[in-house]
Amino acid sequence: MPYIAETKEMERVFGSGVTAVRALQGVNIRVEKGRLLILRGRSGSGKTTLLNLLGGLDRPTRGEVFFQGKEIGSLPDRTRTKIRREGMGFIFQSFGLFPLMSAAENVEFGLRLSRIPAREWKGRVSESLELVGLTKRANHRPYELSGGEQQRCAIARAVAHRPELLLADEPTAELDSRMGKQISGVFRRLVDEAGMSIVMTTHDPSVMEVADVVYELEDGSIIKS
Ligand SMILES: Nc1ncnc2c1ncn2[C@@H]1O[C@H](COP(=O)(O)OP(=O)(O)OP(=O)(O)O)[C@@H](O)[C@H]1O
């Protein structure tokens, strides 16, 4: 099966009647395995809505969304949560780390939610921190880390259970351009060295450089790829 994720004529309408907002319409995208795909577009063009639908965090109003060949948009919440926890990883612009836990403990927390047996946790934690170049900071708490290091820790946490698909919403928005470059390098490595598939939204031109595929959204439709 060539595509890790796919949408068919997908539409998402928020609300109803005169106040209805058509956030997405007629969206057809395909995410190939082992590729880094970027969603770009102006504020309000529908990027986050699309990412949430691909990640099974939301359901389309019309059309279909597939993960690993399986239609997930019509599945009940519990089933989608299970698929998400096992097969996907999420990264947000505001890192979302636990302040009282060290970097390593934050990464381990991600594993607790998955079905990875406890005896594998320690190895997975070191491996993930290594992958993002954070081994030396394993025992530091988030407030002792730079913004870029905090985001790398969040990435390590999102990939520790080795998800098939990594979804990132504006992962460099809170970082300066040097750190943004560092983070985009980490994403590139995850694809090239760990064979991961990534979809991320961004406005950041330096992140755009590392993409294999760029889709542009305008008013809820894909206008260019
Ligand atoms: N829960 C919601 N209820 C109503 N309208 C919503 C909801 N979520 C998003 N929208 C609307 O859908 C449209 C697309 O929003 P979305 O957040 O996907 O855009 P975006 O491209 O990610 O924007 P940004 O770059 O500012 O994050 C916007 O008009 C937004 O106001």
Image (cartoon, rainbow, N blue to C red):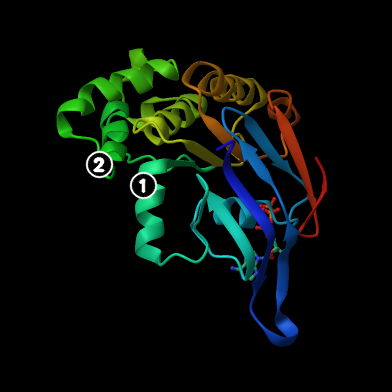
Q: CA distance from mark 1 to mark 2?
A: 8 Å
* Image coords of residue 37 (percent x, y): 66, 35
Residue at screen point 63% across, 30% down: 36
Q: Residue furthest front?
A: 1
Say if mark 1 contacts mark 2, CB within 8 Å: yes
Q: Say left or right for 223 vs 113.
A: right
As drawn, 190 above or below 60: above
Mark 2 C-beta closer than 8 Å to ligand 1: no
Task: Indicate the quadrant containing the N terminus: top left, top right, bottom left or bottom right.
Answer: top right
Disc 1 residue crowd, few under 14, some 14–19, many 20+, Cα 10 Å: some
Upstream in sequence: badge 1 or badge 2: 1
* Dot 2 crowding, Cα within 10 Å, few <14, some 14–19, many 20+: few
Asked whether 222 or 185 is in front, the reply is 222
Residue shown at the point (24%, 20%) measured from the top left: 123
Q: Is residue 92 left or right of residue 15?
A: left
- Res. 112 visible in picture: yes
Which residue is tagged 1? Answer: 85
**178 above or below 18?**
above
Q: In the picture provided, is 43 more to the left or to the right than 143?
A: right
- Please, which residue is most extreme toward the left here? 119
Q: Secondary structure at mark 1?
A: helix
User: Which residue does the numbered mark 2 point to in the structure image?
Assistant: 115
Displayed quadrant of residue 121: top left
> Which residue sits at x=35%, y=30%?
160
Residue 108 position by quadrant: top left
Going by the picture, which residue comes out furthest to the right? Answer: 223
Q: Is residue 139 visible?
A: no
Q: Position of residue 49 (x, y in %)?
A: 62, 57
